[in-house]
């Protein structure tokens, strides 16, 4: 039986507002808790006005300049990828690099995990979000899956994988050129571990997988977006990033076990979300695919994808991640998840 509870607390704030000649002003806050982890996010509908004032629109001239300047030294562009990117040792991967379509996978020069490859997604140095199409994403994810399966064969300790994307500098990317990263480790990193521990605890308590119960509870509600293949797309009740959506595979926990149609359907969903972000005026994003090897008895977990938009690119832009997120680990909601889900449905 589902024990999922969507908990929120409302409170009121009163003060004398100098923008209204010091008349008494009133605001209502809503504090939401994630039903699995208890992570907190806060919503104040008046923050939309602040967002308009403090978060600027993308500057097309700055973006054009960024593309032109960075292309001159990009070692992912054209034939440079053959000459300037690392190769795996021949005993690990005879070809040195792994290719699927335009996607090229190779080692990271500065590894953050036991296995940490980069996937150069395409030959194009820059893409608008609507240009991250299904086939391009599917080639990149397929390359990542092939690499994971190779690692499984060679490293018995490798059990936890995350396929990630940082697009442009506000998202933490050091290169403009579209690419993915992947970390495969013997231990899950912090948030990944919390997801696994909490979902397995829920399974032990209820006998039911948390994410399946979540799908059933949300399926007819305002945060449910769409089903594409085996992937359920939703907006989270208490998001951990701006304009967040997530996808749950209804059966599998291991990215390595996904079928070709699974990868194609996931790529479709990611491409639809990115196209939607573009209509909102965004250009920068992060996503993560969370996976655990199937032999690790993770009955309560399912392969999970989270995707968020990041700050826009303009001169002297301010970061969208500050004390609230980094040190209090509480997210700020600008647009309610229910509104976002309603807007995204039309893109599926």
Image (cartoon, rainbow, N blue to C red):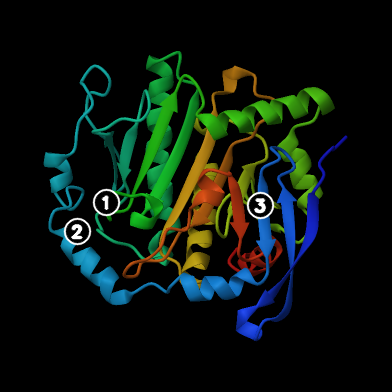
Q: Secondary structure at mark 1?
A: loop
Q: Is residue 333 left or right of residue 307?
A: right
Along the viewing direction, whichever of 194 and 142 lies nearer the viewer: 194
- Per the image, the residue denoted by label 2 is 70
Position in image of residue 163 (x %, y %):
45, 39
Among the 4 quarters of the image, the one containing residue 311: bottom left
Position in image of residue 326 (x %, y %):
51, 45
Q: Which mark is residue 175?
A: 1
Q: Classify 10 Å Cα crowding around label 3: few (below 14), some (14-19), many (20 and above).
A: many
Disc nearest the viewer among 2 and 3: 3
Decide: is 85 above or below 179: above
Q: Quadrant of the C terminus?
A: bottom right
Q: Residue at x 55, y 58 (%)?
A: 242
Position in image of residue 2 (x %, y %):
85, 38
Q: Secondary structure at mark 3?
A: strand
Q: Residue at x 53, y 44 (%)?
A: 261
Q: Classify 10 Å Cα crowding around label 1: few (below 14), some (14-19), many (20 and above).
A: some
Q: Mark yes or no: residue 265 visible.
A: no
Q: Secondary structure at mark 2?
A: helix
Q: Residue at x 41, y 47 (%)?
A: 165
Are the residues at dot 1 and dot 3 in contact (C-beta closer than 8 Å)? Answer: no
Position in image of residue 136 (x %, y %):
38, 53
- Cα gap from disc 1 to disc 2, whole angstroms: 8 Å
- Per the image, the residue denoted by label 3 is 41
């Amino acid at each position: 039986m589902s024990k999922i509870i969507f908990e929120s607390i409302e409170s009121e704030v009163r003060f004398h507002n100098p923008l209204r000649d010091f008349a008494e002003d009133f605001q209502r806050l809503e504090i939401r808790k994630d039903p699995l982890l208890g992570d907190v996010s806060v919503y104040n509908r008046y923050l939309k006005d602040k967002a308009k004032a403090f978060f600027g629109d993308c500057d097309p001239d700055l973006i054009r300049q960024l593309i032109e300047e960075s292309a001159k030294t990009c070692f992912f562009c054209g034939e440079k990828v053959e000459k300037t990117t690392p190769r795996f040792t021949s005993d690990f991967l005879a070809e040195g690099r792994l290719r699927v379509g335009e996607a090229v996978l190779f080692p990271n020069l500065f590894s953050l995990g036991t296995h940490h490859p980069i996937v150069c997604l395409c030959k194009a140095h820059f893409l608008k979000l609507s240009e991250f199409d299904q086939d391009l994403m599917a080639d990149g994810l397929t390359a990542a899956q092939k690499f994971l399966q190779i690692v499984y064969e060679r490293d018995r300790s490798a059990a936890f994988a995350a396929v990630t994307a940082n697009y442009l500098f506000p998202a933490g990317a050091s290169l403009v050129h579209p690419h993915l990263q992947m970390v495969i480790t013997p231990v899950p990193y912090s948030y990944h571990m919390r997801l696994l521990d909490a979902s397995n605890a829920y399974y032990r308590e209820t006998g039911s997988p948390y994410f399946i119960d979540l799908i059933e509870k949300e399926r007819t509600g305002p945060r449910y977006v769409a089903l594409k293949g085996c992937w359920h797309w939703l907006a989270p009740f208490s998001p951990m990033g701006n304009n967040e959506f997530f996808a749950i595979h209804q059966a599998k926990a291991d990215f390595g076990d996904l079928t070709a149609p699974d990868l194609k359907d996931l790529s479709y969903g990611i491409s639809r979300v990115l196209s939607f972000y573009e209509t909102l005026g965004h250009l920068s994003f992060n996503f993560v695919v969370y996976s655990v090897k199937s032999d690790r008895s993770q009955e309560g977990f399912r392969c999970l994808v989270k995707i968020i938009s990041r700050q826009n690119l303009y001169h002297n832009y301010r970061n969208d991640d500050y004390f609230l997120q980094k040190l209090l680990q509480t997210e700020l909601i600008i647009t309610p998840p229910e509104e976002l889900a309603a807007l995204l449905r039309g893109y599926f």
